[in-house]
Image (cartoon, rainbow, N blue to C red):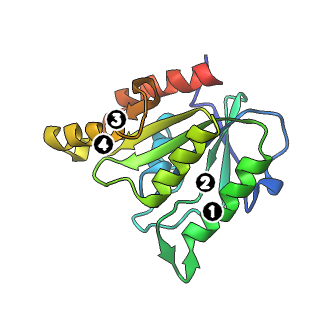
Amino acid sequence: MINFQNVTFIKSAPSYADAPEGMFPEVLIVGKSNVGKSTLINTLCQRNRLAYTSSKPGHTRLLNYYLIDEKFYLVDAPGYGYARGGVDLDALFGKMMEDYFTNCPRLKLVLILIDARREFNVNDEEILTYVQENKIPYFVIVTKVDKVNQSEKHALVNRLKEKNITEDALFYTSSLRPKTIESLKSAIEKVI
């Protein structure tokens, strides 16, 4: 059993070449800027300020490594879909992810975060297509489900079905409902 509360921030790395030493498997978190990556990390680990959350998109620009229970690294990637301070985060994300996917033999799972209130964008489509075509295990995590009504959620479910995402790879989460995280923790544990 993995104790997600036993977590240590290890380091921020500008590229995979600067990743921490060790042979731990890796779970990569990707998603649009402001989708709730930091909130998911904090909720998974039951820590309020483990990962920095910001109301301003584009804060994460490095690969942030968290060691979970000395079993695996949870790796927070920069968000995409936003340009801030003259930095094209899509270009940064693309270069960093190409390097990561090419050079990371320990990647076991990709968590693709999607905001329940938003449509799939081109970056979401590209990352989903990439992991599906390369047979990389993935879960699609729909965040902020507490902010949509039942008809909006139903429409979202239909859109996700069109993407060939199986039921067992789909999770609906809310930081306001921590129980929605328990099934995700169990699923991550099975992959690790």
Say whether disc 2 or disc 1 marks the residue closer to the N-terminus: 2
Instruction: Compute the Cα span from label 4 to label 1.
Output: 25 Å
Tag of residue 77: 2
Instruction: Compute the Cα span from label 3 to label 4.
Output: 5 Å
Instruction: Please state, as top left, top right, bottom left or bottom right, where the N terminus lies in the image.
Output: top right
Q: Position of residue 138 (x, y in %)?
A: 55, 35
Residue at numbered disc 4: 159
Q: Quadrant for residue 122, please give it.
A: bottom left
Say whether disc 4 or disc 1 marks the residue closer to the N-terminus: 1
Tag of residue 161: 3
Question: How packed is label 3: few (under 14 Cα within 10 Å), some, or many (20 or more)?
Answer: few
Q: Position of residue 143 (x, y in %)?
A: 37, 44
Which of label 3 and label 1 is nearer to you?
Answer: 3
Which of label 2 and label 4 is nearer to you?
Answer: 4
Q: Position of residue 188 (x, y in %)?
A: 56, 27
Specify the amino acid type for callout 1.
Answer: Gly
**Discs 2, 4 touching: Cβ within 8 Å:** no
Which of label 4 and label 1 is nearer to you?
Answer: 4
**Discs 4, 1 touching: Cβ within 8 Å:** no
**Discs 3, 4 touching: Cβ within 8 Å:** yes
Q: Position of residue 29 (x, y in %)?
A: 56, 45
Q: Secondary structure at mark 2?
A: loop
Question: How packed is label 1: few (under 14 Cα within 10 Å), some, or many (20 or more)?
Answer: some
- 187 shown above or below 137: above
Question: In the shown orientation, is residue 92 left or right of residue 186?
Answer: right
Residue at numbered disc 1: 94
**Residue in view at x 81 percent, y 56 percent:** 18
Which of label 3 and label 2 is nearer to you?
Answer: 3
